[in-house]
Amino acid sequence: MNEEIGSYDAKTRLAEILRRVEAGERFTITNRGKPVADLIPSLAAREQQVDAAIANILKGIKHKLSDEELLDLKQNGRK
């Protein structure tokens, strides 16, 4: 459910509201009690986060450990 906020409050607290929207919150901006706009997280920002996560996963998959590296990790894990 969206939190309602008046247009004056939205204007005066814009930086705070944008931080909260970036964190996933949603707001309905009202003018004299009537809803006029919804402020929701950007789909483009979410897509960038997903793309970065996929790139990190693929980077990890591409890095293959040699037998020596695996043996070293195994031995260090037993200490």
Image (cartoon, rainbow, N blue to C red):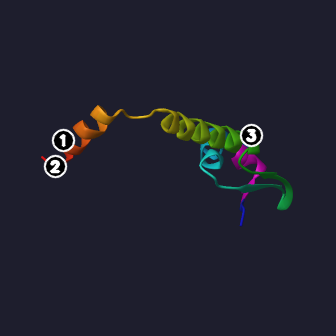
Q: Measured from the top left, where is residue 4 in percent x and y?
A: 73, 60
Which residue has dot 3 on it?
A: 44
In terms of secondary structure, where does tag 2 sit? loop
Could you tell whether 4 is left or right of 79 in the image? right
Q: Measured from the top left, where is residue 47 in percent x and y?
A: 70, 42
**Labelled disc at residue 76:** 1
Q: Nearer the viewer, residue 73 or 31?
A: 73
Kind of residue at disc 1: Asn
Q: Earlier in the sequence, mark 2 or mark 3?
A: 3
Kind of residue at disc 2: Arg
**Labelled disc at residue 53:** none
Note whether 59 is above or below 10 in the view shown.
above
Could you tell whether 57 is left or right of 77 in the image? right
What's the distance in space between the residues labelled 2 and 1, CA to CA?
Answer: 5 Å
* Residue at (36, 32) in percent of width and height: 66
Mark in the foreground, 3 or 1: 1
User: Which residues, given as a range, are shown in magenta?
Assistant: 4-10
Could you tell whether 64 is left or right of 77 in the image? right
| Residue 49 in which image quadrant | top right
